[in-house]
Amino acid sequence: MSSVPAESRYIHHEDLRLHHLDWGREDLPPVILVHGIRLHAHVWNNFARRFNDRLHILALDQRGHGDSGWASRDRYHTEDFYRDLRAVVLERKLRRFTLIGHSLGGLVSMLYAHRHPEELERLVLVDITAGLPDAPPGADLSRISETPPPHDFDSVEAAIAYLGRMLSLAPPDMVEESVIHGMRTTEAGRYTWKYDPALSHRPRPVSTSMDLWNLVGGIPTPTLLQYGSHSRVVSDELADRMAKTMPCCSVERIERAGHALFTDQPDAFAASVERFVFGRTAS
């Protein structure tokens, strides 16, 4: 892995200051990484360290997450996240790039690919499809990868231990790094997650009137759908439907991985993306 650090970059969009991490040189093929709800840009650090000598990697902090500004409670719809992504693409003058989105970030990426297919080299959807498996109303299928309560801790170490118990498949150093970058100090001196508490409630889908299955059926971009063998978000049936619905979609199942498969199985995740992007196996 390369030891080149990421540079923090900011843009102003609407009334928000939006943060993203930038690895690598601008003469390399660009890749944009879009995290899931209640996560942050640093969850991609392991992947970025592997490839920043071959790819120009940008990892977004979506509004209300990480070091980006918080919006009002009614401005956390998928359309809002899409507009933020679009603003970063335009600000950075990216004309042709690979887009990788996890969970909510994958929904945002689907919408982007639908509206701007001419800009995308490839699309990677990480444990998300155009539909969800059957579940009780209000169930949070993301479960443990998109940081759950409790909301505050006595110390960072307590938060690391807590999340480590939940992400039992993940390498401990990746859990630690995610927690360190994903926490802030409260006025009371305790430690809590960086995301806006309003995001404890999942944003609305892309549109109540939009048929996501119809939307993805019109995306011509070469697409890789990855899903975890232990995922509660993507089933074998949903993955198969995506492969049949999208014109150019291949599917890879990552074994011994849940919804946060890039954290649960970072080697397998990286190898899968590398096969898709470069046509060979990660070293």
Image (cartoon, grey):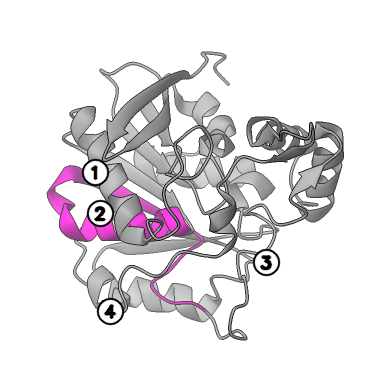
Query: Of helix, strand and loop, which one carries label 4?
Result: loop
Image quadrant where residue 250 sits:
bottom left
Q: Tell me, for residue 211, which label it has, or none.
A: 4
Secondary structure beneath disc 2? helix
Closer to viewer: mark 3 or mark 2: 2
Q: Quadrant of the N terminus?
A: top right
Contact, mark 1 vs mark 3 (Cβ under 8 Å) = no
User: Identity of the amino acid at label 4?
Assistant: Asp
Residue 39, position in %: x, y? 57, 46
Q: Position of residue 100 (x, y in %)?
A: 39, 47
**Label ID, residue 86:** 1
Quadrant, the C terminus: top right
3 horizontally vs 74: left or right:
right
Residue 113 located within the stretch drawn in magenta:
yes
Vertical position of residue 86 compared to residue 92: above or below: below
User: Looking at the rendered structure, which numbered label has been put on residue 155?
Assistant: none
Left or right position of 11 against 21 = left
Q: CA distance from mark 2 to mark 1?
A: 8 Å
- Residue matched to label 3: 230
User: Crowding near pointer 4: few (<14 within 10 Å), some, many (20+)?
Assistant: few
Does 171 appear in magenta?
no
Of residue 10 and residue 111, the one placed in the foreground of this image is 10
Dot 4 and dot 1 residues touching (CB under 8 Å):
no
Q: Earlier in the sequence, mark 4 or mark 2?
A: 2
Tally the numbered discs. 4
Task: Report the residue marked by disc 2.
Answer: 112
Between marks 3 and 2, how big is the CA–CA gap?
28 Å
Q: CA distance from mark 3 to mark 4?
A: 27 Å
Which one is in front in this view, the residue at disc 2 or the one at disc 1? 1
